[in-house]
Amino acid sequence: MSATFRSSTSAYSLIEVLAILALIAMVAAIAVPRFETLVDSVRFDTNIKAVAAAVRNARLSAYLARRQTTLEEYFEGVELPSGWTVYFPDPVVITSRGVCRGGEMLIETTSRSLSWQLDAPRCEPSEDEAT
């Protein structure tokens, strides 16, 4: 009796493997930049919300301290994200009762410039994107 062994395994050819790798590379080339844009957008939105929260906190801080202040004075102690700058063309006054008198706030980032009109009495920002 003679024993013969047959291989029942099948394999992919080199061409098939290279074609699959090429498809994966094309999908990655399209998906990765879009994912990075999405991450940057989420990071920007989070930082903008943090700046808006700082404006609200300035009102609360003035109220609790029973002391009039300006947003410019308050933002001197606020840690902004890297590459972000906040300017106030005119002082935005917050009374000792936490009432904002309104004004303009300019936010410059590495990629955008924003102008916020801070409406009295709550300093709620209305956003105008400049760039």
Image (cartoon, grey):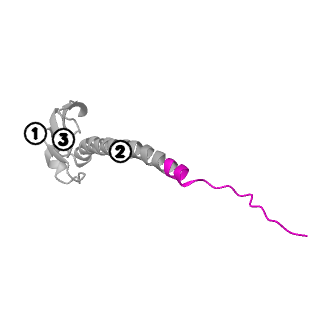
Quadrant showing the C terminus:
top left
Foreground: disc 1 or disc 3:
3
Relative to 5, is 130 above or below? above
| Residue that appears at 21% across and 43% down | 111
At mark 1, the secondary structure is loop
Q: Say which quarter of the image contains residue 40.
A: top left
Question: Mark 1 or mark 2: which comes first in sequence?
Answer: 2
48 lies left or right of 130: right
Q: Where is residue 104 in the image (x, y as percent from the top left)?
A: 15, 34
Q: Which residue lies furthest to the front in this view?
A: 2
Q: Position of residue 82 (x, y in %)?
A: 23, 53
Q: Which mark is residue 91?
A: 1
Residue count near mark 1 (Cα–Cα under 10 Å), binned few <14, some 14–19, many ≥20: some
At mark 3, the secondary structure is strand
- Mark 2 is on which residue type? Pro
Q: Which mark is residue 33?
A: 2
Taking depth in this image into account, of 121 and 87 the one nearest to the observer is 87
The span picked out in magenta is 1-19
> From where the camera sits, is residue 68 visible?
no
Q: CB of mark 1 within 8 Å of CB of mark 3?
A: no
- Mark 3 is on which residue type? Ile
| Residue that appears at 71% across and 58% down | 9
Per the image, is 87 magenta? Answer: no
User: How many dots with numbers?
Assistant: 3
Q: How far apart are marks 3 and 2 (CA)?
A: 26 Å
Taking depth in this image into account, of 42 and 55 the one nearest to the observer is 42
- Mark 1 is on which residue type? Pro
Q: CB of mark 3 within 8 Å of CB of mark 2?
A: no
Per the image, is 12 magenta? Answer: yes
Q: Where is residue 112 in the image (x, y as percent from the top left)?
A: 20, 40
Taking depth in this image into account, of 37 and 90 the one nearest to the observer is 37
